[in-house]
Amino acid sequence: MPANNKLSEIFRSLSGVFRSLFRIKREERCLASFLLIVFLVLDALVVCKYYDVFTPQTRHYWHLFISKFHISGFDPITYSVVSDWTAGYNVYRHPLLAFFMYVPYLINQALMWITGINCAIFIVSAIQTFCAFYASMFLYRIFREIVGVSRTDSSLLTIFFFGFSFVMLSAMVPDHFIISMMLLLLALYVSGKLILKRRSLTIWQSALYFFLTAGTSLNNGLKIYLSMLFVNGKRIFRPKYLFFAILLPAALTWGAARMSYDHIVWPRDVAAKAARAKAKAAKQKKQEEEKLRKQHDDSVRIASFTAYQLDSLSADSARRDSIAKAKPKPVRRRKNGKPISNGEFLSWTDVTTSRTESVVENLFGEGIQLHEDHLLGDVLKSRPMIVNYRHAFNYIIEAVIVLLFIAGIWCGRRSRFMWLAMSYFALDMALHVGLGFGINEVYIMSAHWIYVMPITMAFLMKAMAVRRRQALALKTLVALLATYLWIWNVSLIVRYLYFTR
């Protein structure tokens, strides 16, 4: 009975937490309605673009989506998993994400049976819209309830944030980034509320946030550990908490990744390798047979040539060989720098790419405002690692936003919550800028950290609130930046989707 009472108490607590987190409050309804419409329109742009290509049913969904979907370096793996379930993601980087998509897969199977078309693009779009919507609500609540700025300032900063190019794109494309961003903002919001109330993250809360966040993207699970440290302090090292909240969830998540690899990924890869080898052998056999047949035909044909014809044929062959040798060989362009090693994880690192150029053009550049040249190109295909803006004003805009970010850090330097948010940022900078993990397309990962910028700006707005003129000037500046970013990024996205071949 005591165990049953404890279990029912946990379920009641969970129910109350979910109601309080996902219920839209009265003061949020206007902003929520506006953003919901915006997210629906943005997702509709992608759905309309790929409707004719992705809705027909087929037996080869993976090849269809991978070969036809092209928006920057985003992967349409979720489309494939929801269409034909398998552990399609890299299980060591996304240990539980395929399992999170199993229910959407079942829903899609039912809809495919009813409608006769593949509804994956609609189901994934619904997931993206849901996550983008609640990410915006959690961010608004961080501004309003934790930093403590006004309703107007909170709304303005939320709209400004979703004008960032790769935040906007993350809400549109079938990748995991908007899911991760929603979970990270949820963890920050809950952690901030607990810090204000001087309460601790419980074991079940810590384990649940870790499973959801690390299960979606493993490196983000480290940020839950940072939340535990900032909220609970040294109490996280107590044996019970250390085992049940940290060690056990980490072991279970890693175990799930290993089991997925051993029982799903490895057998599938072995079968695919065998099939490719069989197809290659059959192709080689056919080529050899064709070569022998051609040699036989040529020998019969040459036997009827005169001596003059044979000399002419030999001269033509020699001339073709000399031209082929003189032709310059195509130069292969490197798409990333030299890694630390070629292991499972370290092969994604990079120790040679220029950090300065990447920070200016990619980290704080492409992630916030798109480049016109090589628009939304994939760095693994045709886009260079470094692309420059055509206009000086793009760099001015970038510099202003970064200066506001730095000023916000200074204004919030005494806030424990701000340093928690900055620890999230520091972790990603250590991975991407320090180790060079994915630095060749670092803007793709913007949704994992870039929310820190408007959070620090909220501290700047709070500090300026007592100075009316400065506060009005700052609000006007942020409003102008938000307007510019929305016009600039949306126009370029629409151009890419519908006016670029």
Image (tube, rainbow, N blue to C red):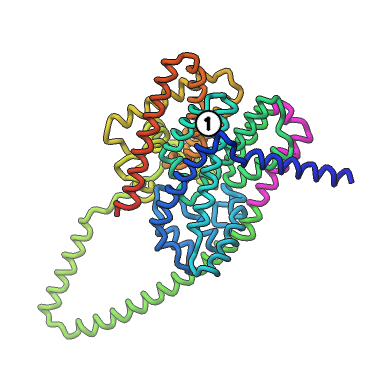
Residue 370 relative to residue 191: left or right: left
Q: Is residue 246 magenta?
A: yes
Percent of width and height locating residue 1: 89, 46
Tell me what residue is drawn at x 50 percent, y 25 percent: 458
- Image coordinates of residue 360 in percent, x first then y, are 38, 31
Would residue 80 be found to the left or right of residue 22 on screen? Answer: left
Residue 105 position by quadrant: bottom right
Quadrant of the frame with the C terminus:
bottom left
Q: In this rendering, does residue 270 appear at all?
A: no
Q: Quadrant for residue 492, please give it.
A: top left
Asked if the stretch drawn in magenta spans residue 121, the answer is no
Q: Looking at the image, is 160 positioned above or below residue 376?
A: above
Front in this rendered view, residue 217 or 437: 217
Magenta-drawn segment? 232-257
Q: How many marks?
A: 1
Q: Determine which residue is flagged by label 1.
A: 425
